[in-house]
Image (spheres, grey):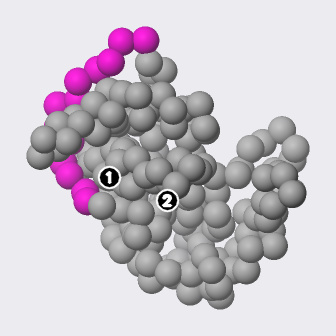
Amino acid sequence: MSAESMQIPKETIPLQSKEGKYLTFELAGEEYGLEILKVKEIIGIMKITSIPRMPTYMKGVINLRGKVIPVIDLRLKFGMEPIEYNERTCIIVVDIADGMQNSLMMGIVVDSVSEVLNIGAEDIEDTPAFGTKVDTEYITGIAKVKGGVKILLDIGKVLGCDEMVTLQAVA
């Protein structure tokens, strides 16, 4: 059986499997969430050493206690306007799988970190359809929290396979 036929469409994944604790953060005034189990730590913005010939959203690498970690700016990855980093800007260090049983530590720059929320299945809806030309594979669902919505991300799918290979080479 091919790998393509083994993939389960996102719509068939039960909402119960999406419930849990999420670290919420802000980008350009919108709230997003990451599964807390993928988050290793949150650090303040620090010096990022740039690497030549990388896409603009790949900011470079940091030295975190002797370990070199690649860093991407999530604003730039999502095509948002860049902003000056400030005292609220954070790097969320996440552990993501590359699809081949390997994991990669990566830093993502966000505008600010909000809180950790326990989101139940009843508060999560499937990603709405935006048409065939809009890729929403990296969105696991939309959470209805405190009268607003939070976009729940699958951080492993935010980056494509080619980008993962590039990040592993840099790390």
Look at 32% across and 18% down and name the residue there.
Answer: 51
In the image, 98 versus 138, the foreground residue is 98
Q: Secondary structure at mark 1?
A: strand
The answer to whether 58 appears left or right of 47 in the picture is right
Position above or below: 14 against 129: below
Which residue is label 2 attached to?
Answer: 32
Asked if residue 152 is positioned above or below residue 68 in the image, the reply reads: below
Residue in view at x 43 percent, y 52 percent? 103
Q: Position of residue 120 (x, y in %)?
A: 56, 86
Q: Dividing the image into 4 quarters, which one contains the C terminus?
A: top left
Q: Which residue is mark 1?
A: 92
Query: Which residues fall within the magenta stretch?
Result: 41-53
Q: Please provide percent x and percent y for residue 57.
A: 45, 28
* Residue 110 can be seen in this image: no
Q: Is residue 81 left or right of residue 120?
A: left
Residue 135 visible? yes
Question: Whole-percent x and y of residue 49?
Answer: 23, 24
Question: Looking at this view, is 87 or 55 the one in front?
Answer: 55
Q: Position of residue 155 (x, y in %)?
A: 51, 53
Examine the rendered structure and indicate whether residue 57 appears above or below residue 63: above
The tag on residue 116 is: none
* Nearest to N terminus: mark 2 or mark 1: 2
Q: Is residue 80 magenta?
A: no
What's the residue type where badge 2 is placed? Answer: Tyr
Q: Secondary structure at mark 2?
A: strand
Was residue 42 drawn as part of the magenta stretch in this picture?
A: yes
Which residue, as the protein is rendered here, is positioned at the far top? 53
Q: CA distance from mark 2 to mark 1?
A: 13 Å
* Count of numbered marks: 2
Q: Nearer the viewer, residue 96 or 2?
A: 2
